Amino acid sequence: MYIKIESMRLDWYSNPKHQALIRTDLYQGIIDTIAARGACASEAGLRIMLPKSFPGCDRDIHARFLDAMTLDQRFGKPDYFVTRIGRR
């Protein structure tokens, strides 16, 4: 069931009408830079931009990393690394 829901969400984002809704036109400079690096036009394919609210995409992981680094800057490095193993 999870795969079906995930597939439906990806299909929604791949629709050109919805790509305009999440304002992918702002990423045109990024796309031009990637395309200029050497991929042939036939190999480029269609690029679909996912918002950072889509869990597991590169932008989501990068945003979570930056959030973790902000906590580290604000509160300092942790003094102890505690792990706990629970057994029944």
Image: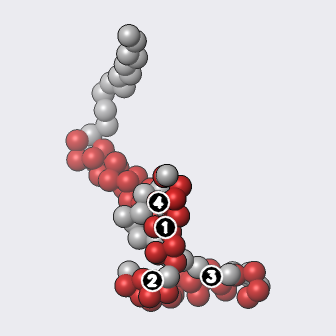
Residue neighbourhood size for the residue with mark 4, other residues' Cα within 10 Å, grouped as few (<14), some (14–19), many (≥20): few
What's the mark number on residue 5?
Answer: 4
Image point (37%, 64%), residue name: 53
- The tag earlier along the polypeptide, 2 or 3, is 2
Please report whichever mark, 3 or 1, sits nearer to the chain's N-terminal start. 1
Residue 5 % position (x, y): 46, 60
Badge 3 or badge 4: first in the primary sequence: 4
Q: Position of residue 25 (x, y in %)?
A: 44, 89
Residue at image mark 3? 46
What residue did someone put label 1 on?
Answer: 8
**In the picture, residue 35 is in which quadrant?**
bottom right
Give the class, few, some or many, for how many residues have Cα within 10 Å of label 1's Cα (few <14, many ≥20). Answer: few
Q: Position of residue 82 (x, y in %)?
A: 35, 22
Q: In the displayed structure, would residue 44 be above or below residue 5?
A: below
In the image, farthest residue toward the top: 88
Question: Which image quadrant for residue 83?
Answer: top left
The answer to whether one can see residue 32 in this image is yes
Contact between marks 1 and 4 (CB within 8 A): the answer is yes
Q: Which residue is mark 2?
A: 19
Q: Secondary structure at mark 1?
A: helix
Amino acid beneath label 1 = Met
Q: Which amino acid is tagged 2?
A: Gln
Q: CA distance from mark 1 to mark 4?
A: 5 Å
Quarter of the C terminus within the rendering = top left
Inspect the image, locate mark 3, and give the three-letter code of the amino acid beneath it. Answer: Leu
Report the amino acid beneath label 4: Ile
* Residue at screen point 38% across, 16% down: 86
In the rendered image, the residue lying farthest to the front is: 1
Between 88 and 64, which is closer to the camera in this rendering? 88
Does 16 sit left or right of 74 as displayed?
A: right
> From the viewer's perspective, is the residue at label 2 or at label 1 nearer?
1
| Depth order, front residue of 11/49 | 11
